[in-house]
Image (tube, rainbow, N blue to C red):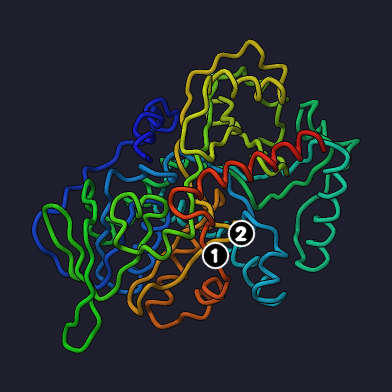
Amino acid sequence: MLANDLKLTQNSYYAASANEQPHYPKLEGDIIVDVCVVGGGFAGLSSAIELRDRGYTVAVLEANHIGFGASGRNGGQLIAGLACEQDVIEKEIGFDGAKQVWNMTLEALDLVRERVKRFNINCDLQDGFLGVSVNEKKGKQLRHWFDDMQKRYHYAAEWIEPAHIKKWIDSPRYFNGYYDKRGGHIHPLNYCLGLARGAAGLGVQIYQHSAVTAMQQGQSTNISSAVLQTDKGQVKAKFVVLAGNIYLPEIAPQLAPKIAKRIMPVGTYIIGTEPIESSLAAKLIPSNAAVCDTNFVLDYFRLSRDKRMIYGGRVSYSAMTPPNLTQSMQARLVKTFPQLKSTKVEYTWGGFVDISMNRAPDFGRVAPNIYYLQGFSGHGVALTGLAGKLVAEAISGQATRFDVFADIKHHDFFGGKLLRTPALVLGMAWYQLREKFG
């Protein structure tokens, strides 16, 4: 089902503008490490870096190539908070726990900047995020949310009244919004490649094209261990971090069948225009911030370093690519920015991200020595870095912060393997109709 990703990522602006990267070999033979990380995206590489910093020997097994999945093709937006509202977290773990989660998402933003500086990653890091509403009704909802977040969570962002919104974004679509200087955007593939380079420099063993085909628990001198098989090799480790997200069930469903039922693949799609004249680009988004609206099925966009508009907005809950993808995406772009009606689209790409039922991240254990990180629900550019730090803390014996997330309850998607995708399609269609007709 997810093989579509191979085709969809071929016309990616990120791939076309990627930094050079050293070759990482395929695993051949047997190795022994303290921790084996499955997945070479943001979460897996962040885990590897944090674990290596704590003195563990670490191997990363990536089924394809570094940054193959969502880490290498997402919107590149750095946003505070989670994909779900804070009241979802409050209902699960109370206000104090929810506030701790919120503060950790702010820490996640800082962590991206720290790693960019530490590993000298050339990924076009830009500060600033704009959250915007598309009409008066949604504007009132956004204002209520903003006031509540300022009052109870001390959220330090700037409110933008309707009279001033055009100074922030030159579009007829938006009613009001807010600006968060701690947010921002990056070239996600180059950031991922930079994390891999940084991890390798610390001594992490990275193996590409080394899909895990089986995993068994074992005992070694009274210490729990695990053995992970690939087609050409084997890794024996005291601990395992499963960070393959939506690809784990596809590659090796026996690794963690219970947690696989708690996430669903959602196709997300982005276009990249030809370079826009600099003065026009500066007028469209004067702050050069990343922008995202508050719709349930939302649009998100930003300017690249070379002044292309990177615009995301279509989603697919059926695992099938929408028809006339480039044309429909361009129509959304022109609706937002009529000034770009004659601007050519040079890139169209996409792929799958993992979502959880409640849109909250799903972190936990499938065994005392086997951890998993999944369910970032399209909010993972910064949050994955935090996840890697938390799982490293837990493996080191300091699990308090990891367990704050692990205490959030998650449910299987209803309908079973055959019916849950059609059920989700119907549910999302209802949300889209509700937003369309108010």
Q: Which residue is mark 1?
A: 411
Which residue is under mark 2?
358
- Apparent side of residue 51 relative to residue 296 in the rendered image (left or right): left
Of discs 1 and 2, which sits in the foreground? 1
Q: Secondary structure at mark 2?
A: loop
Instruction: Give the structural element (helix, strand or loop) at label 1.
Output: loop
User: Disc 1 vs disc 2: Cβ atoms closer than 8 Å?
Assistant: yes
Q: Residue furthest top?
A: 342
- Image quadrant holding the C terminus, namely top right
| Residue at left offset 58%, top offset 64% | 107
Residue placed most toward the observer, 170 or 229 = 229
Using the rendered view, name the quadrant where residue 245 is placed.
Answer: bottom left
Q: As shown in the figure, which amino acid type bears the numbered disc 1?
A: His
Residue nearer the viewer, 127 or 207: 207
Q: Earlier in the sequence, mark 1 or mark 2?
A: 2
Tell me which residue sits at (14%, 62%) in the image. Answer: 234
The x and y percentages for residue 337 are: 71, 22
Spot occupied by residue 26 in the image (x, y as percentages of width and height): 16, 49
Whether residue 125 can be seen here: no
